[in-house]
Structures are given as structure tokens and as C-alpha cells.
């Protein structure tokens, strides 16, 4: 009997110790993570994708955890906890801010324990702000960086493809401007990655569009696949739907306090649909500035395209979902041309996490919304935005009632295919 008890105790302790090696608690993360302070926070883009788990300024609750279910399907690389260092007093930061961050970590661990595995790296990012009003306009919460699992990649590669007619060899342009740049090299190689902006354009039947692209530092690799697509379409007999390109960098490194709505600047455009000219504009814009603060001058750039390219039938905005629209108040002016704005959302695949201003721009101009994997029609966008507005208007009591109703529905469906 003693041997059996000893054997059972040995197994229990072994499992316990093994589990502790594979996981790290919220308090352990607090002790290990390094803190980076910044006034110009911009998430990195060195991995395939990001998931956002937002929190409100000064609040504990994670406001959207719907994509926690996707964490088991990816390889998690690292996680950032983003918060504002305000108030700045040492007493508040050492006591209250630490308590708030620990509570946020504990809250996240309840729904996303995968993020607390031992191999996941953590970093804290502190916004340096001057007042609470400034802090409220910034992103707070968690940013999860991930890669697709190798198994998933291999399975996708093994799917037999329907034989297609052999495409013509794309014509590689001769670049007169900086032929050694990363963008030029990518176009010359001519190999688009799966689930990129290349595939979004390939799915559409747009005609005579002007591409308006956020060209701040974190967005450099989203426009280049579009240029590759444009070049390959033209090589097939000049069939590209793109007339011109407009790149905006939110003010050419203008100090944030000097940026004025509608006059922020940092807009660079091509006179033709030339790939070489587009690459030159990309480099010119990149050299002039990388963005500064989080909000961008999307509508100002769209208005520029609307005014300077009257022959365009529509505008395509390549937008950064991590950045808010600085000049959304100019939307009424944008509507006057009656040209639809099709918005290609980058840096999220979660429909519920798309910023409300992008829904507004698409709906008000009778355009559409697109992620790298999904196309949303105008009718679908209107219905989805209506649902989001209804949820936002609900009281806490109504939200809990809705949650209970959904849980009851799930229980009934349990066991059914």
C-alpha cells in the first residue's frame, strides 16, 4: 500500500513540476518582462500576423477575446502589454500601475492561457503621454505576434491544384530608380506570398482605380505585392485596373502638435501607372518621414486622389487597422464625388476588431471592406456595422442577458454537427 501511495505521489509531483516548467504565471511575467518606453509606439511586422486583445485606458477588462480560439492554430512568438505611463509619479507607477497591469494579465490568462507558456516572450510597452486625454486616444491592451504553424503550411502545400493554363512569363521592368531596393527586388523575383495584398487585388473586378496607401514605417510590405500584381497584369496585355498610386506618410516628420486636419501633408503621387515611378514615390515618401504618432491622414490622401484623378471610377485605400484616422471629420467632403472607397484592411483578420472609422468611410462612400482573406460587400458592411452599433449601445445588464442567451443556444447545439 505504501509503495502504491509513494508511486502515486511521485507521478503527481512529476506532472506538477513538468506543468510549471511549461507555463508562467501572470506574476512571473510581471517579474521577467522588460519595459520599453516610447512616444511613437508602432507594432513590429517581422512575423506573419498579430492578434489584438484591447483594454480601455485605466481599465482591467479585455474588451474582445473572440479570437482566443485561434491561438491553438498558430505559433505564438511574443506578446506585448501596451499601456500609458500616466500619471507619471513614481508612487503611482510603482504601486497602482503595477497592480493594474497584473490584474490585466490575470484577466487575459483566464481566456488565453496559451499566451503564458514558458516559450512565449513578453515585453511591456509604455506610452509616454502628457495628459489623460492624450492617453485615451492611444491603443491599450495586448498585441500577440504569431507565425502560421509549419504543419498548416505543409498541408496547404499538399492540396492538389486544378491544372491551369500556363501563364505567360511576366515582363520584369528595368528600374531607372534604385534597382537594388527591397521593393524592386521583390517585383523582379515575382513570387507573391499567400494571403497578401496581391491575392486581394486578384479576387476583385475593379476597373480604373487609384490605390491610396498608408506608407508609414509599419506598412512597407503591404503595398509592394500590389505593385507586383500591377506589373504582372500589364505583362498579360496591359490589363491592370490601377491608374495611379498615392502614398501618404502623415506629415513628413512634422511634429505631432503641428499637424492640422486636412493640411497634414506627406502625400506623394504618381502621374502615371508606371511601376518605376511608383517605386520612386515610395522611396521619396519613406525618406521624408515614417509617420510619427499613431493616427494617420487617410481622408486627406483620399481627397487628394479624388481631386487629382477625376477619371478614376473608385479609390482603393490600403489601411493600417492599428492606426486611427486622424481626419475622419472630413468624411462629408469625401462623399461629394460619389466615388466608392474600397478599403483593404491590414494587420487584423478579425472583423469585429476593424476600426469603426473604416466601416464609416466604406459605407458612406458606398464602397466595400476587404481583409487579406475575406471580402465584405456594402450590404454586409452595413448590417455588420449596425450590429456593432447595437452592441455598443447596450447596457451592461443587456450585454449579460445577450451573453446568457448565446450560452444557452450553444448548450442546445452541443453534440450536433
Image: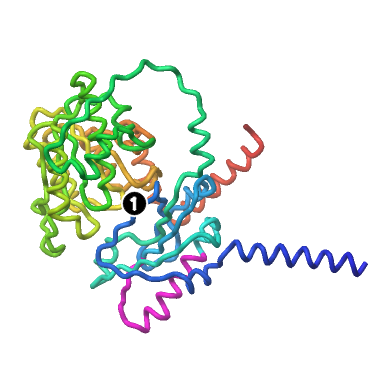
The percent position of residue 86, horizontal first and vertical second, equals 31, 74
Classify residue 235 as left or right of residue 147: left
At x 55% / y 62%, what residue is drawn? 118
Q: Is residue 175 visible?
A: yes
- The quadrant in which the C terminus is found is top right
Q: Is residue 87 magenta?
A: yes
Tally the marks. 1
At x 35% / y 32%, what residue is drawn? 375
- The quadrant in which the N terminus is found is bottom right
At x 14% / y 65%, what residue is drawn? 257
Quarter assignment of residue 388: top left
Vertical placement of residue 155 versus 206, above or below: below
Q: Secondary structure at mark 1?
A: loop
Please, what is the dominant secondary structure of the magenta stretch?
Answer: helix
Q: Nearer the viewer, residue 20 or 109?
A: 20
Seen from this angle, which residue lies furthest right? 1
Classify residue 254 as left or right of residue 193: left
The percent position of residue 232, horizontal first and vertical second, equals 25, 27
The percent position of residue 410, horizontal first and vertical second, equals 59, 42
Classify residue 41 as left or right of residue 283: right
- Crowding near the residue tagged with mark 1, few <14, some 14–19, many ≥20 C-alpha atoms within 10 Å: some
The percent position of residue 256, horizontal first and vertical second, equals 16, 62
The residue range painted magenta reads 83-106
Q: Is residue 332 visible?
A: no
Vertical placement of residue 253 versus 214, above or below: below
At x 36% / y 62%, what residue is drawn? 140
User: Where does label 1 land, which residue?
Assistant: 45
Q: Nearer the viewer, residue 203 or 359?
A: 203
Quarter assignment of residue 17: bottom right
Vertical placement of residue 244 versus 150, above or below: above
Q: Nearer the viewer, residue 247 or 147?
A: 147
Quarter assignment of residue 412: top right
Amino acid at each position: 500500500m505504501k509503495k502504491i501511495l509513494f508511486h502515486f505521489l511521485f507521478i503527481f509531483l512529476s506532472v506538477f513540476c513538468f506543468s510549471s516548467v511549461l507555463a508562467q504565471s501572470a506574476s512571473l511575467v510581471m517579474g521577467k518582462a522588460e519595459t520599453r518606453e516610447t512616444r511613437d509606439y508602432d507594432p513590429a511586422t517581422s512575423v506573419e500576423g498579430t492578434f489584438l486583445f484591447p483594454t480601455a485606458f485605466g481599465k482591467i477588462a479585455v474588451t474582445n477575446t473572440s479570437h482566443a480560439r485561434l491561438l491553438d492554430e498558430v505559433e505564438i512568438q511574443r506578446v506585448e502589454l501596451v499601456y500609458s505611463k500616466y500619471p507619471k509619479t513614481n508612487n503611482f507607477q510603482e504601486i497602482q500601475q503595477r497592480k493594474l497591469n497584473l490584474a490585466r494579465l490575470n484577466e487575459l490568462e483566464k481566456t488565453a492561457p496559451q499566451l503564458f507558456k514558458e516559450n512565449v516572450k513578453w515585453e511591456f510597452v509604455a506610452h509616454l503621454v502628457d495628459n489623460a486625454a492624450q492617453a485615451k486616444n492611444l491603443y491599450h491592451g495586448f498585441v500577440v505576434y504569431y507565425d502560421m504553424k509549419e504543419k498548416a503550411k505543409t498541408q496547404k502545400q499538399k492540396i492538389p491544384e486544378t491544372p491551369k493554363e500556363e501563364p505567360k512569363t511576366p515582363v520584369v521592368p528595368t528600374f531607372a530608380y534604385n534597382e537594388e531596393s527591397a521593393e524592386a527586388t521583390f517585383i523582379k523575383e515575382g513570387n507573391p506570398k499567400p494571403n497578401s495584398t496581391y491575392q486581394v487585388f486578384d479576387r476583385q473586378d475593379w476597373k480604373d482605380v487609384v490605390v491610396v496607401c498608408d506608407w508609414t514605417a509599419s506598412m512597407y510590405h503591404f503595398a509592394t505585392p500590389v505593385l507586383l500584381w500591377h506589373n504582372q497584369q500589364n505583362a498579360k496585355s496591359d490589363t491592370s485596373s490601377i491608374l495611379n498610386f498615392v502614398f501618404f506618410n502623415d506629415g513628413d516628420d512634422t511634429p505631432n502638435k503641428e499637424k492640422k486636419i486636412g493640411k497634414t501633408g506627406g502625400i506623394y503621387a504618381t502621374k502615371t501607372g508606371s511601376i518605376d515611378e511608383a517605386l520612386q514615390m515610395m522611396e521619396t515618401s519613406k525618406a521624408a518621414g515614417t509617420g510619427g504618432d499613431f493616427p494617420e491622414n487617410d481622408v486627406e490622401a483620399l481627397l487628394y486622389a479624388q481631386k487629382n484623378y477625376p477619371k478614376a471610377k473608385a479609390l482603393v485605400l490600403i489601411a493600417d487597422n492599428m492606426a486611427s484616422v486622424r481626419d475622419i471629420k472630413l468624411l462629408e467632403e469625401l462623399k461629394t464625388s460619389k466615388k466608392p472607397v474600397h478599403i483593404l484592411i491590414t494587420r487584423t483578420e478579425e472583423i469585429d476588431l476593424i476600426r469603426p472609422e473604416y466601416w464609416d468611410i466604406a459605407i458612406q462612400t458606398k464602397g466595400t471592406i476587404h481583409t487579406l482573406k475575406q471580402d465584405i460587400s456594402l450590404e454586409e458592411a452595413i448590417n455588420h456595422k449596425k450590429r456593432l452599433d447595437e452592441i455598443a449601445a447596450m447596457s451592461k445588464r443587456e450585454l449579460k442577458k445577450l451573453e446568457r442567451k448565446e450560452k444557452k443556444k450553444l448548450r442546445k447545439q452541443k453534440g450536433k454537427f
